[in-house]
Image (cartoon, helix red, strand yellow):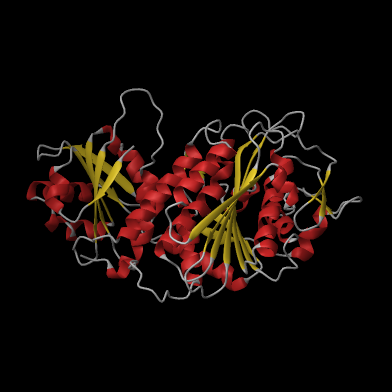
Amino acid sequence: MARLVFSTHPNSVVRSSNHCMVIARPERVELGLALLPPGISSILSHLSSEIQAGLTGSVATTLTFEGIRRLSLGVLSSPGSRYNCPARPDLIVRFLQMSDLLRDAHTSVIIYLEDLDHLEGTLTGIARGFPIFDRRSGPPTEPRVHVMLVGPDGKPIRLPVEEKKRVQVIRTAAALVDTPPSELHPENFASKVKKNVEDLPRVTVKELYGPALARHGLRGLQAVGKASIIPPRLICATYRPVRPRGPHVAMVGKGVTFDTGGLHLKERGHMEGMKYDMAGAAAVLGAFQLLADMGVAMQMSLILCLAENAVGPASYKPDDILTLHSGKTVEINNTDAEGRLILADGLSYAARSLGAKILIDTATLTGAQLVATGTQHAAIISNDPALETLFVEAGRASGDLVHPLPFAPEFYQMEFRSPLADMRNSVKNRLNAQSSCAAQFIWSHIETTNVRWAHVDLAGPAWLGERGTGFGVSLVTRVVRSLSPPARSTSHYRSPSNSVA
């Protein structure tokens, strides 16, 4: 696991490194050379003249005799399309992976920012580029990576404590996704959640499992997880400011710690990697931690629906009819469409039992999301146009990109018709906008509650290159901060624009 050390001293960054990587746009390379020793500056100047950024950037590496054994230059391409984050965290991650920085014990990264508004997206790229989880054999190592960010004025940026925390929380969320499912089962996940939030001010936690799930009407969650030897559970953490203002926001995460598909068993090649089906829970857990630590002005609730969709004598079955928390009955026609069952329960609980007025859920809900919006963009589906726009803007700023899919109950509700119950849990026509339909199923369980709701399907971007990414932490944090009125008490948070040393 790499330890990230953020520094504002160029000489110490360079001198402490066996391998130094510089990342900048072509026009910023020459402007930033004054910060570096003359020998290193000269080599970088030569490297920059030899490589072209192109559409997807470019990396060059050379050996040196200037104290640094290896020197790499990553040249960023243009800010990209209007659908991308101008900071290009996608390229930062790729450059860090290509350069194989962690092969050396002491390394450094220097990134020149074109605009201070790119700070958040740049840090997202750094967080994704240095994953924590590692179980390879050999003696444990903790390489130290010195990171220096340089602003458009050529001066190093001193990061606020909150931004350093955000980087670490993204890395921790990614590590949860990477953890083997036999270790991160619902009970252990719940223990980690309680440990992560127990020291946060004004936060209380309760856990429902076993018979308590049925008593609280959470029969969808109970059914999905009842075949596992580790019972399913709902974790509810609530943050209450001293004088809450603004709407009560609930963040709900799908936490299926492993998904076999149930009795509709996934085939080989589709079950591998299903430990990541809890990435939505990891995302909102991280966001809740950051927001509570910042001391936002409004009440927040975190609801994690934790279950293992296992196979056994107690498995819920096709043709079963469940009564969910909303009171609606659901005929099961696909046990592998389990995420929408537990989210429907979690969201209904947030609206009806907790009284939340804004609901945000994050989930690796459909493989169809990858077909619709790809591996870089999550899908956002919302009943509120302003909330949808807020998510898109937050995605471009944070690097957790999202793209809207239709919210159209008149087109999708009919897909769930059942002759015996209020609805089925899977669509009749699998070619009819499956990701929007899955969201429609969830919405049908909260449509009478008069809430503002946004659903983020992050199946693609939560898991790239066989590693968790921590996607969603920054996105949800930024959205909820935008929804919150300014806190009356003094906050330690400073925006990136006030962070230049």
Q: Quadrant of the C terminus?
A: bottom left
Position of 14 with respect to 157 (left or right) is left
Q: What percent of the width, then of the height, locates residue 214?
A: 75, 47
Residue 257 sits above or below residue 48 on the image: above
User: Residue drawn at (35%, 40%), measured in percent from left and top?
Assistant: 97
Q: Nearer the viewer, residue 349 or 168?
A: 349
In which quarter of the view is residue 131 placed? top left
Q: Nearer the viewer, residue 338 or 211?
A: 211
User: Residue drawn at (22%, 40%), measured in percent from left and top?
Assistant: 107
In which quarter of the view is residue 123 placed? bottom left
Residue 63 sits above or below residue 155 on the image: above
- Say whether residue 168 is visible: yes
Residue 329 sits above or below residue 178 on the image: below
Q: What percent of the width, then of the height, locates residue 377?
A: 53, 54
Q: What percent of the width, then of the height, locates residue 439?
A: 68, 57
User: Residue drawn at (75%, 60%), measured in percent from left and top?
Assistant: 444
